[in-house]
């Protein structure tokens, strides 16, 4: 029995997804450490109110940047491995070139529109106007970083996909902030925004050069034009990315609108610690998504079921351990950001519980998206976002950051329940922890 268990463990650890996941975890943990350090320094240098003044505009920049990205990053994760599996070199080249040109054009147009909104309208409050004017310049590099990440992930290059955004960008930002804090130099919201623009440009150039050096040979084939099909196929991924980002940023925007920059700032440590809670799921998904796309191409449902079961159990146990650790250590963690942030420590329990539920539901969204059911995944996320928004509008004016935490947790729960139901109906097996207690047949709905 012991030998069989050890043999099974070695098989799991030597698999494609396990190896890629371990690399992804190493990169992500390092990046989270840098990002956490950057957040702590920013919070201490700016204070809760100043922190809110920069992160509300940055939330807007992320949303507008995703509009410029237009779903091409998510489509790349599905399209590239499928093209490689079928030997369609010309179609692969056409897709990459078309995606790059579209993202540059759309994000540049979005930048112009955002500048007009910030300068010539009253849609943005005066406390955010100056920082948003600078933030608009970040839209193009932000969109291109996302596209390059999706392309690298589609080629199966985990380190290349993650390093520019998760290591280089926070690392470059962390160093000058540390120097400013040590020397006691003046630092304000506008300086923060200019630093953010510089780090985004450095990260974008690093990602572009890395992709060019590693995939030049594959992309040298003669392109075959399929532009209309690519754009239409990318639209569901645009919806997925936009809704996913809104799910994470809507509470910051609602706090900035219905509460104050101070409440928005106090809530930011919760936002910063959420990626730690999702680390097991997101790290495993870096290779899980392309692998499922490959297996779906061959309709290998039994293999999909086995990989999904391993994914669900592993990520659920790891997420549970992380959630308990972070929630218990909440008061200490919040104190690192500064005394005025300590009040948000109890809010971690709401978000931690929701993320454990998220992991226990399994990779339902990825299963749907990688099998051509992106619209179903989008519907689930829209349901969760709608609940988040409605509850947030009701509770945030009354309870501030507490209302935002409750709204976020309820949105995550509704999103997962809805997506899980659709994935179970499509694959004829339940990818959640509960579902794998039972043996189901492996047929797939058409």
Image (spheres, grey):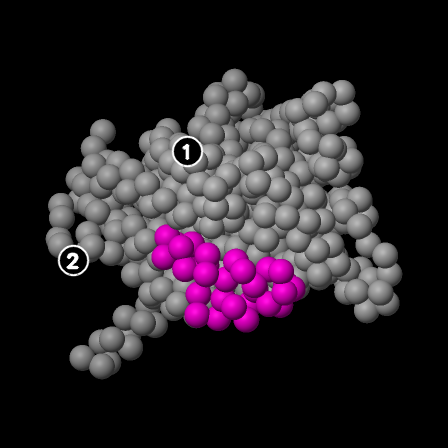
Q: Which mark is residue 29?
A: none
Q: Residue furthest front?
A: 398
Question: Which residue corresponds to the image point at 46% horizontal and 35% vertical from the top-left?
Answer: 393
Residue linked to disc 2: 437
Which quarter of the rendered picture does the N terminus lie within? bottom left
Question: Which residue corresponds to the image point at 85% horizontal and 57% vertical from the top-left?
Answer: 186
**Rendered image quadrant of residue 78:** top left
Q: Which residues are magenta?
A: 327-355
- Which of 45 and 33 lies nearest the eye of the viewer? 45
Question: Which residue corresponds to the image point at 28% horizontal and 42% vertical from the top-left?
Answer: 417
Question: Which residue corresponds to the image point at 62% horizontal and 60% vertical from the top-left?
Answer: 340
Residue linked to disc 1: 390
Answer whether residue 133 is magenta in the image.
no
- Position of residue 287 measured from the top left corner of the image (x, y, whole percent): 44, 52
- CA gap between label 1 and label 2 equals 35 Å
Is residue 372 in view from this perspective?
no
């Amino acid at each position: 029995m012991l030998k069989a268990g050890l043999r099974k463990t070695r098989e799991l650890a030597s698999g494609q997804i396990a190896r890629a996941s371990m690399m992804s975890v190493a990169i992500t943990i390092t990046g989270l450490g840098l990002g956490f350090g950057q957040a702590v320094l920013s919070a201490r240098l700016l204070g809760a109110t100043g922190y809110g003044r920069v992160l509300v505009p940055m939330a807007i920049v992320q949303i507008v940047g995703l509009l410029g990205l237009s779903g091409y990053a998510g489509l790349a994760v599905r399209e590239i491995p499928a093209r490689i599996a079928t030997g369609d070199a010309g179609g692969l080249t056409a897709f990459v070139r078309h995606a790059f040109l579209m993202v540059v054009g759309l994000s540049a147009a979005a930048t112009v529109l955002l500048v007009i909104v910030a300068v010539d309208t009253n849609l943005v409050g005066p406390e955010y106007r100056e920082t948003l004017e600078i933030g608009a310049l970040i839209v193009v590099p932000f969109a291109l970083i996302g596209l390059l990440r999706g392309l690298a992930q589609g080629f199966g290059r985990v380190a290349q996909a993650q390093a520019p955004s998760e290591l280089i960008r926070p690392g470059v930002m962390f160093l000058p902030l540390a120097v400013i804090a040590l020397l006691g130099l003046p630092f304000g919201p506008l300086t923060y925004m200019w630093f953010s623009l510089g780090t985004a440009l450095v990260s974008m150039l690093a990602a572009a050069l890395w992709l060019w050096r590693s995939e030049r040979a594959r992309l040298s084939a003669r392109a075959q034009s399929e532009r209309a099909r690519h754009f239409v196929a990318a639209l569901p991924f645009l919806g997925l990315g936009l809704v996913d980002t809104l799910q994470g940023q809507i509470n910051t925007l609602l706090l900035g609108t219905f509460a104050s920059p101070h409440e928005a700032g106090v809530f930011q440590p919760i936002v910063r610690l959420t990626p730690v809670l999702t680390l097991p799921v997101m790290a495993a998904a870096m290779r899980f998504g392309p692998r499922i796309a490959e297996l779906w191409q061959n309709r290998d449902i039994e293999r999909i079921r086995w990989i999904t079961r391993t994914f669900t159990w592993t990520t659920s146990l790891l997420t549970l351990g992380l959630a308990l650790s972070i929630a218990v250590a909440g008061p200490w963690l919040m104190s690192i950001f500064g005394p005025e942030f300590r009040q948000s420590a109890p809010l971690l329990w709401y978000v931690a519980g929701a993320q454990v539920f998220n992991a226990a539901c399994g990779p339902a969204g990825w299963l749907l998206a990688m099998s051509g059911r992106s619209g179903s995944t989008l519907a689930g996320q829209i349901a969760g976002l709608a609940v988040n928004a409605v509850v947030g509008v009701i509770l945030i004016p009354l309870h501030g950051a507490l209302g935002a935490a409750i709204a976020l947790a309820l949105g995550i729960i509704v999103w997962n329940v809805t997506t899980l139901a659709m994935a179970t109906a499509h694959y004829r097996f339940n990818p959640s922890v509960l579902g794998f207690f039972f043996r189901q047949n492996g047929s797939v709905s058409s």
